[in-house]
Amino acid sequence: MAFTLDIGAAAPDFSLPATDGQTYSLADFKEADVLVIFFTCNHCPYVTGSDELTRATADKFAGRGVRFVGINSNSKATYAEDSFEHMVERMKEHQFPWTYLYDESQDVARAYGALRTPHFYVFDADRKLVYTGRAVDAPRDASNVTVNDLDRALEEQLAGKPIRVPKTNPIGCNVKWDGKDAHWMPADACDLV
């Protein structure tokens, strides 16, 4: 089996604490026609460089039945800025329009096969994967973005059309795995395309 979920795979369940003080599982988002789950963090320049683009996409589709859920799986031992406390502070400061969950065990990152921050997964109403990869082609510097794959995939999905490019390679820092070098990736992790 590939490290990362393949198109058509079911969304793995989770039970994770959020910055709002609640604990969420997949069922808590059942009302969403489309669910975007993305692996993110507090410190990565590819995340911070594209957060406002992600916000714009989340806001654009919020009234169309699309929910966004961010998951931070980075080890706080690798980057102290990725701690839960810093997640809470970041959400208070930025008021992002998504639920922000903490995957301290990294089990959810392994279940999804998260490669980088950010790494996006789009699930349909049946919670089958229809798109995985990057949101934009230049996440570190929003001024250089020429392609928004996430926006396109959501438009196609909501229009009932097949997603023309269902897989792209996520662009960003690798997930910071606990007890490993900051640049380590699992042996079976590989490019998606």
Image (cartoon, rainbow, N blue to C red):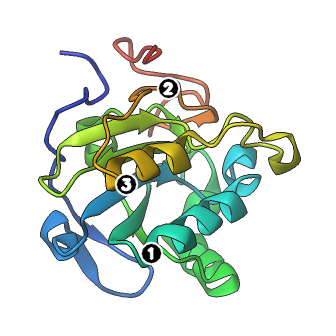
In this view, 98 is above or below 103: below
Residue 174 in picture, x, y percent from top left: 56, 32
Residue 186 in picture, x, y percent from top left: 39, 20
Q: CA distance from mark 3 to mark 2?
A: 15 Å
The reply, left or right, for residue 142 in relation to residue 38 is right
Q: Secondary structure at mark 2?
A: loop
Could you tell which of marks 3 and 2 lies nearer the N-terminus? 3
**Mark 3, residue position:** 37
Taking depth in this image into account, of 28 and 125 the one nearest to the observer is 125
In this view, 130 is above or below 36: above
Residue 103 at least partly seen = no
Label 2: few (<14), some or many (≥20) within 10 Å?
many
Residue 65 at least partly seen = yes
Mark in the foreground, 2 or 1: 1
**Mark 2, residue position:** 168
Residue 93 in picture, x, y percent from top left: 69, 84
Residue in the image at 40% along x and 45% along y: 156
Q: CA distance from mark 2 to mark 1?
A: 23 Å
Could you tell which of marks 1 and 3 lies nearer the N-terminus? 3
Q: Amino acid at mark 3?
A: Ile
**Mark 1, residue position:** 62
Q: Amino acid at mark 2?
A: Thr
Q: Secondary structure at mark 1?
A: helix
In this view, 188 is above or below 134: above
Mark in the foreground, 3 or 2: 2
**Total numbered badges shown on the rendered structure:** 3
Label 1: few (<14), some or many (≥20) within 10 Å?
some
Q: Amino acid at mark 1?
A: Ala
Residue in the image at 29% along x and 39% along y: 130
In this view, 141 is above or below 96: above
Mark in the foreground, 1 or 3: 1
